[in-house]
Image (spheres, helix red, strand yellow):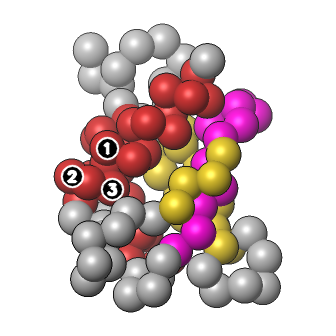
């Protein structure tokens, strides 16, 4: 259940940060799995790069209620990336 919520919150964070290509398509978020932190697998569409996503990591973290968001490469393919969402153990940070 947590992975599903994090996947939705990352998608909302992409909208808040304006991470879409010229056609208005968001990144393709494939799946999420909890492993200490939630790990989301994503593919960039044409016109966006993982560097764009890393530059907006604070906005994504705010949308997820996370302490931080880390963007990492998943494979040699440039369009594939992992988004690691580090959330606090209980509740929202600072509350």
Compared to 16, does 34 lie above or below? Answer: above
How far across and how far down the image is residue 50, in percent?
A: 50, 76
Magenta-drawn segment: 32-44
Residue 19 at what x, y percent from top left? 30, 67
Instruction: Kindly identify which residue carries mark 1.
Output: 12
Distance in Å between CA atoms under marks 2 and 1: 6 Å
Mark 3 nearby-residue class (10 Å; few <14, some 14–19, many ≥20):
many
Q: Quadrant of residue 76?
A: bottom right
Residue at 28% x, 78% y is 23
Label 2 sits on residue = 16
Kind of element beneath mark 2: helix
Which residue matches tag 3?
14
The residue positioned 74% from the left and 69% from the top of the image is 74
Residue farthest to the front? 23
Q: Quadrant of residue 22?
A: bottom left
Residue 39 sits inside the magenta stretch: yes
């Amino acid at each position: 259940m947590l992975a599903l919520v994090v996947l939705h919150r990352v998608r909302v964070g992409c909208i808040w940060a304006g991470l879409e290509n010229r056609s208005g398509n968001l990144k393709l978020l494939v799946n999420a799995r909890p492993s200490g932190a939630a790990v989301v697998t994503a593919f960039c569409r044409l016109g966006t790069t993982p560097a764009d996503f890393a530059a907006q990591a604070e906005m994504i973290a705010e949308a997820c209620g996370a302490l931080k968001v880390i963007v990492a490469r998943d494979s040699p393919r440039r369009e594939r990336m992992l988004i690691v969402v580090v959330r606090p153990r209980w509740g929202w940070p600072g509350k």
